[in-house]
Image: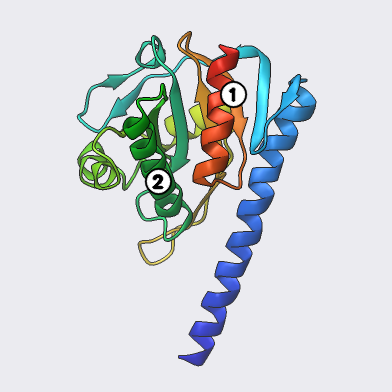
Amino acid sequence: MARVTILSRIALGAAAVLMAALGFAVAHWWAVARAPVQSLATGTLLSPARDLPAFSLLDQNGAAFTPASLRGHWSLLFFGYTNCPDLCPTTLATLATLQRAWQRDGAQHPRVVFVSVDAKRDTPAVLARYVPYFDASFTGVTAANQPQIEDFARRLGALVIIGPEHDGTYSVDHTGALFVISPKGQLAAVLSGPHTVQGLREDIARILAAGA
C-alpha cells in the first residue's frame, strides 16, 4: 500500500509539472509564432484576432456545435475532461464564481464552453450531467471520436496527451489555458493563467473593451 501511495504521489507530481509546461508552451507559441501586440495579466491579447479552424462537434444536448455557434457573442473555451481530479473542477468553479459576479453586476461577459478532450468517456449525456453542476449557463462540447476533438484542439493551440490504456483506464493531460473567442468567431486572446476570479475579470474586461 505504501508503495502504491508513493507511486501515486510521484504520478501526481509529474502531472502537475506537465500541466505547467503545457500552459507555458501554449503561451509561448502564441507569443512567438503569432506576434501579439499586448500582454495581459494572465495571458495574451492577439491583434489581429485569428480565424478558427473549421470544426463540427456536439454539445451536451447532442446538437451540432460549429463555428456558427460561436458567432454573435463572446465565448470562453476551456479544454478538459469530466474525470479530471483537480484542474478542471477547480477552473470551472472559478469560472462559475466569475459568472455570478458578472450577473450580479450586470456586466457584459463571455459564454463559457467546456470542451472535453476525452471523447470516449465524455458523451453528450455525461456532459449534460457534469457541466450544469458548476453553472446552468455553461455549455459542454464533445466530439463523435477522439481524433476529431484532438484535431480541433491542436489547430486551436490546445495541447492534449492521451496516455496508453491499461486495465480499462488511461490518463489525460491537457493545457489549462482559456481561449477567448470574439463575436466574429475569431480567437481574440489566450489566457494561460494562473486563473483567479479577479485576474480573469480584469483581463476579460480589457479584452471586451478592446473589441477584438
Which residue position holds label 1? 206
Where residue 200 appears, as percent x and y from the top left, is 54, 37
Looking at the rendered image, the disc whose residue lies closer to the viewer, 2 or 1, is 1
- Position of residue 42 in the picture relative to residue 140 (left or right): right
Residue 31 lies in quadrant: top right
Where residue 133 appears, as percent x and y from the top left, is 25, 47
| Residue shown at the point (60%, 74%) measured from the top left | 10
| Residue shown at the point (56%, 16%) measured from the top left | 209
**Mark 1 closeness class: few <14, some 14–19, many ≥20 residues within 10 Å:** few
- Position of residue 61 in the picture relative to residue 209 (left or right): left
The kind of residue on which mark 1 rests is Arg
What label does residue 43 carry, if any? none
Question: For this rendering, which residue is in front, 44 or 50?
Answer: 44
How many dots with numbers?
A: 2
Mark closer to the chain start, 2 or 1: 2
Question: For this rendering, which residue is in front, 150 or 82?
Answer: 82
| Residue shown at the point (38%, 38%) measured from the top left | 101
| Residue shown at the point (30%, 46%) measured from the top left | 134
Q: Give how far apart the Cα atoms at labels 2 and 1 are.
A: 21 Å
Where residue 152 appears, as percent x and y from the top left, is 49, 27
Can residue 154 be seen at all in this image of the molecule?
no
Residue 65 lies in quadrant: top left
The kind of residue on which mark 2 rests is Leu
Question: For this rendering, which residue is in front, 182 or 79?
Answer: 182
Q: Quadrant of the N terminus?
A: bottom left
What label does residue 92 carry, if any? 2
